[in-house]
Image (tube, rainbow, N blue to C red):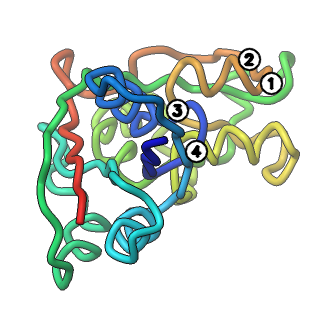
Amino acid sequence: MIKIGYQGILNSNSEEAAKQFASTLNEEYLLLPLVSSFNVLDNVNNGNIDYGVVAYKNNTGGLVIETVQAIKFLDLFLVDEITLPIHHFLFVRDQDVLVKDILAIASHPQAFTQCKKNLTIKYKDVKLIKDEDTATAARKLKLELFDRFTAVLCRMNAGEDNSLYLLDSYLEDRDDNTTSFRIYKK
C-alpha cells in the first residue's frame, strides 16, 4: 500500500491535494496527516512514507516559507504539482456569537496573507492568532482550546466537520486565489 503524507490534518487544503494526487495512482493508498512541511518531508526523506504533499506557493501570499525551509537541505525528487482554488471561510463555535463579538481569528499565516485586505476592512481591530494549519485551528475551536469569541479562518469542510457556525464567506482577497502543492518522493 502506498503511503502519502500531507501537511495539515483532515479537512486541510493539503489533504485535498493529496486526495487528487492519490486518485492518479492505480494502487491502494493511505493518507497520513503530518501537520507540518518539515514532518512530511522528513518522513519522505527517512523512507517512512512514499510521497509527501506540501503547500509550496500561493498566487497571493507567495512562497510558503515553512516548505521552502524544510526542503532546503533535502535531496528529494519532485514528482508532481497540483494547483487548487483556495477559499477561506470564517467560523465560530457558538451560534450566538456575532461578527461584532469577535476578538481574535486563528488560522495559518498563509491564510492571513491571502485575506489581508478583507481582514483589514472587515476585522481591523481583531487579533490574529497564528496556528499550524487552517484545519487544526478549526479543530482547536471545536475542542474549546480557543475562547468563544475567537473565530477561525479555514476551508468550508473544516468548519462544517467540526460542527462550527459559518459567520463570513470568501474572505480571500482574490477571486482566483490558488495554491500550488508539490508532491515529493525519495
79 lies above or below 132: above
Placement of the C terminus among the 4 image quadrants? bottom left
Q: Which is more foreground, mark 3 or mark 1?
A: 3
Q: Residues within 10 Å of mark 1 (few under 14, many from 20)?
A: some
**Nearer to me, 68 or 25:** 25
Q: Mark 1 to mark 2: distance in Å? A: 9 Å
The reply to whether the C-beta atoms of the residues labelled 1 and 4 are less than 8 Å apart is no
The residue singled out by tag 3 in the image is 154
29 lies above or below 26: below
Q: Mark 4 to mark 3: distance in Å? A: 12 Å
> Could you tell me the amino acid type at mark 3?
Cys
**Left or right: where does residue 46 sit relative to residue 182?**
right
Q: Position of residue 81 (x, y in %)?
A: 14, 39
Which secondary structure, mark 1? loop
Q: Which is more foreground, mark 2 or mark 4?
A: 4
Q: Quadrant of residue 101?
A: top right
Q: Quadrant of residue 17?
A: top left
The residue singled out by tag 1 in the image is 97
Q: Which is more foreground, mark 1 or mark 4?
A: 4
**Left or right: where does residue 99 sit relative to residue 108?**
right
The reply to whether the C-beta atoms of the residues labelled 1 and 2 are less than 8 Å apart is yes
Residue at (86, 44) in percent of width and height: 143
The reply to whether the C-beta atoms of the residues labelled 2 and 4 are less than 8 Å apart is no
Which secondary structure, mark 4? loop
Residue farthest to the bottom, as pictured: 73
The residue singled out by tag 2 in the image is 165
Q: Mark 3 to mark 1: distance in Å? A: 17 Å
**Nearer to me, 139 or 49:** 49
Mark 3 vs mark 1: which is more N-terminal? 1
> Could you tell me the amino acid type at mark 4?
Ile
The residue singled out by tag 4 in the image is 9
Q: Residues within 10 Å of mark 4 (few under 14, many from 20)?
A: many
